[in-house]
Image (cartoon, rainbow, N blue to C red):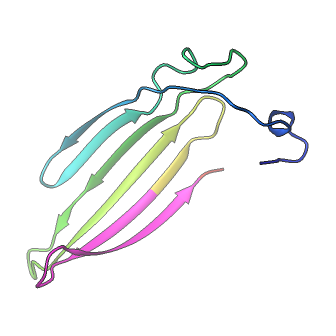
Amino acid sequence: MSIAGDQSFAQNINATIPTIGAGILFNHATFYVGFSTPNLIGNSLASRDDFELSTPYFGYFGYRFYNNRFQDFIVKPNMLIKYEEGAPVQLDFNTAISFKSKKPPLKTVALDFRLAP
């Protein structure tokens, strides 16, 4: 792997970096909201001392629109927010539509859009 002009990628890096993550999700029949982080301990257990790892944080929420008229599909818009120190905030907007079918599972079509400077 090589990125021109970046000394961090000028050499092969071999290290072990254990991670511990946590998250919480509140899931209701019509909406959900959650928060998670995949690296609570940072680089404190890394096998090398020359790493600077930041901890990303994720917030997400979504809603389920049940179609009462036809009862054949569910529209599920949701948003993911990612924050990491030193980086711009990223927003992901997603919408999924699930269709009932005669044979399980549900059939789903999705549209995703990422907004990141």
Q: Position of residue 115 (x, y in %)?
A: 57, 55
Magenta stretch holds residue 112: yes
Image-quadrant location for residue 52: top right
Left or right: residue 92 versus residue 51 is left
Q: Is residue 7 left or right of residue 92?
A: right
Who is closer to the viewer here, 113 or 37? 37
Q: Position of residue 49 (x, y in %)?
A: 69, 14
User: Which residue appears at 32% of the width and 68% of the height?
Assistant: 96
The residue lying furthest to the right in this view is 5
Q: Residue at x 27, y 43 (%)?
A: 33
Number of labelled discs?
A: 0
> Residue 59 at what x, y percent from top left?
39, 40
Q: Is residue 44 magenta?
A: no
73 in relation to 80, above or below: below
Residue drawn 32% across the image and 47% down it: 61
Tell me: residue 40, above or below residue 10. Answer: above
Residue 51, quarter of the rendered image: top right
> At 87% from the left edge and 34% from the top edge, which residue is drawn?
7
Q: Position of residue 92 (x, y in %)?
A: 48, 54
**Above or below 42: residue 89:** below
Q: Which residues are magenta?
A: 93-115
Front one among 84 and 104 = 104
Type of secondary structure dominating the magenta stretch: strand
